[in-house]
Amino acid sequence: MIFATLLFLAQTPAPGVRPPDPGMNIMVMILFGFAVIYFVSIRPQQMRQKALLAQMAAMKSGDKVITNGGIHGMIANVKEKTFILKIADNVKIEVDKTAITTVVKSSEPVEAKA
């Protein structure tokens, strides 16, 4: 009986102190969930998009590239929204800049190590 009374007194808040609101706990959990989703999926996608845009801006004639359709070629000409790709001798195609997924090799020469 004494134990039950002590347990009851331990659970009742002191006068003037409000018990925690269960709705507030739910709000904190929802906000925490949104933060986790943002940092796990949305933020990395934004970083990949920025890197892709920087890669597209840095492409120039002579770069060897691969399109998202799997076509390997060399950039022959750069236009405002498209590239002219040379895929074989006397074979050139025009592709959208967003179709380039990988730059295989840049046209800049690589210095040999001595």
Image (cartoon, helix red, strand yellow):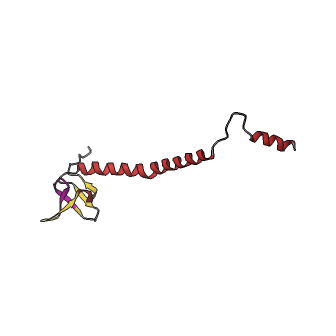
- Specify whether residue 79 is painted magenta: yes
Q: Name the residue rendered at 67%, 38% in the picture.
A: 18
Q: Measuring from the top left, give residue 23's x and y in whole percent.
A: 60, 47
Q: Was residue 68 drawn as part of the magenta stretch in this picture?
A: no
Percent position (x, y) of residue 32? 53, 47
Residue 74, quarter of picture: bottom left
| Residue furthest left as drawn | 90
Residues 57 and 91: in front is: 57
Q: Where is residue 94 in the image (x, y as percent from the top left)?
A: 18, 62
Where are the magenta residues, as a range? Answer: 73-84
Which quadrant holds residue 12?
top right
Number of residue marks: 0
Rendered residue at 65%/41% (across/down): 20
Task: Look at the image and tell me in which quarter the N terminus lies.
Answer: top right
Furthest toward the front, the residue is 16
Q: Nearer the viewer, residue 5 or 102?
A: 5
Q: Position of residue 13 (x, y in %)?
A: 72, 38
| Residue at horizontal 42 percent and vertical 51 percent from the top | 42
Q: Is the magenta stretch mostly helix, strand or loop?
A: strand
Please report the residue visible at 24 percent of the width from the left and 46 percent of the height from the top.
112
Furthest-top residue in this view: 16
